Amino acid sequence: MCPHIDETDMDLLANFKERFAERFAESALTPAELAAHIGVTPTSVYRYLEGKHIPPFAEFVKLADLFRCSGDYLLGLTDEYAAIPFKAPPPFSEQIRFLLQHFGISEYALHKNAEISRSLLHTWKKGATCPSVPNLVKLAALFGCSVDFVIGRES
């Protein structure tokens, strides 16, 4: 299990495990085939199935695209499953700037209200890192929108 995971993250992890297992079973892919589609090892796929990890940002987006579902559905934040195409997201460094401007929130307010460190926010803006899935959920809650809007998969 992830050493830095809190109770909210445990709920996300449990929800993700359940939804991932459902979508994976319906896909008829083997773990090796799924791993090849999203660019991870089969071991990572098994960790997702066992509920030990939530994939990092890029792999999470690839999974949602492969399963043709929203990120919110994959995380159990909504029960609405609609096999609809989503647009390719922009680099998160561009998306975070868009979100701050779109919602009229300062970096300081984001830092305080979402409890995300300023240094982490800075690395996102520089394009050095992308947010973890739990941080995507924090951002969606702060902005009052879907995880897919935060990612840039929906308008």
Image (spheres, rainbow, N blue to C red):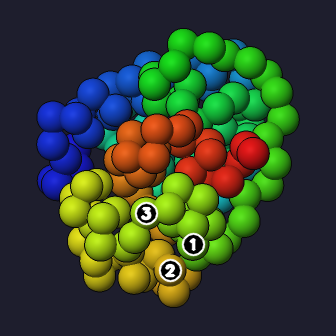
Q: Relative to the observer, which residue lies in front, 54 or 7? A: 7
Disc 2 + disc 1, Cβ < 8 Å: yes
Please state which amino acid type lies under the numbered disc 2: Lys
Dot placed on the residue nearer the N-terminal end, 1 or 3:
1
Q: Is there CB contact under 8 Å for labels 1 and 3?
A: no
Q: Earlier in the sequence, mark 2 or mark 1?
A: 1
Return the residue at label 1. 97
> Which numbered dot is residue 106?
none
Q: Amino acid at mark 3?
A: Ile
Q: Quadrant of the C terminus?
A: top right
Counting from the top left corner in percent of width and height, residue 79 is at: 54, 13
Q: Nearer the viewer, residue 139 or 49?
A: 139
In the image, taking residue 2 as reference, residue 87 lies left or right, namely: right
Q: Is residue 153 left or right of residue 126?
A: right
Give coordinates of residue 38: x percent, y percent. Answer: 67, 52
Disc 1, SS:
helix
Residue 8 location in percent, x, y?
Answer: 22, 35
Residue at which label 2 appears = 125
Report if residue 83 is visible in the image: yes
Residue of label 3: 105
Q: Sort mark 1 into few (<14), some (14-19) or many (20+) by Cα contacts within 10 Å.
A: few
Which residue is rendered at x = 25% and y = 55% of the image? 113
